[in-house]
Image (spheres, rainbow, N blue to C red):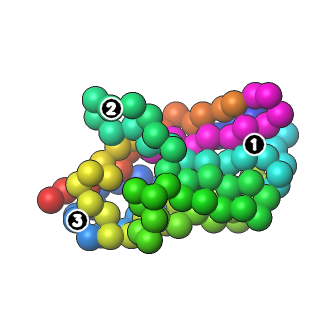
Amino acid sequence: QVQLVESGGGLVQTGGSLRLTCAASGNIYKSSVMAWYRQPPGKQRELVAASRGGDLNVANSVKGRFTISRDNANTVSLQMNSLQPEDTATYYCNAVVGLQTYFGRGTQVTVSS
């Protein structure tokens, strides 16, 4: 069983920055996928960025503004710069361990115009 706890969300003005961090407890490994999803109000959840081992990838929609880092096997961070109102969403940490998929409870990011 894996538990994920996100932190770092909040309210920021357009052009500002936030750093989200997800801490995982349980049996998780460097080779496990840890990722960030977001769900804007009234829309579907979408993948923002993912890490697996040394591979780090971000979605085209946030490339150049968001950076994912895997600090260790249990921690993944998302540095978000040049935030825009359309980045407003609940951000969820995700982990895939074997055949099991886990999500955290989410952290709210609100970007004011």
Which residue does the image show at 28% across and 29% down from the upper left?
A: 42
Q: Is residue 22 magenta?
A: no
Task: Work out whether mark 3 precedes mark 1 in sequence or the reverse, and give the earlier one.
Answer: 3
- Mark 1 lies on residue: 25
Q: Which residues are magenta?
A: 91-100
Please tell me whether mark 2 sits on a helix, a strand or a loop: loop
Residue type at mark 1 is Ser
Q: Which quadrant: the C terminus?
A: bottom left
In the shown orientation, is residue 101 left or right of residue 113? Answer: right
- Mark 2 lies on residue: 43
Q: Is residue 23 visible?
A: no
Mark 1 Cα within 10 Å, few/some/many (few <14, many 20+)? few
- Cα separation between marks 2 and 3: 21 Å
Look at the picture and state if 30 lies above or below 80: above
Which residue does the image show at 33% across and 39% down from the upper left?
A: 40
Look at the picture and state if 85 lies above or below 95: below
Task: Work out whether mark 2 precedes mark 3 in sequence or the reverse, and give the earlier one.
Answer: 3
- Cα separation between marks 3 and 1: 33 Å
Task: Work out whether mark 1 precedes mark 2 in sequence or the reverse, and give the earlier one.
Answer: 1
Please tell me whether mark 3 sits on a helix, a strand or a loop: loop
- Mark 3 lies on residue: 14
Residue type at mark 3 is Thr
Which residue does the image show at 45% across and 65% down from the upper left?
A: 63
In the shown orientation, is residue 52 left or right of residue 66? Answer: right
Name the quadrant containing residue 11: bottom left
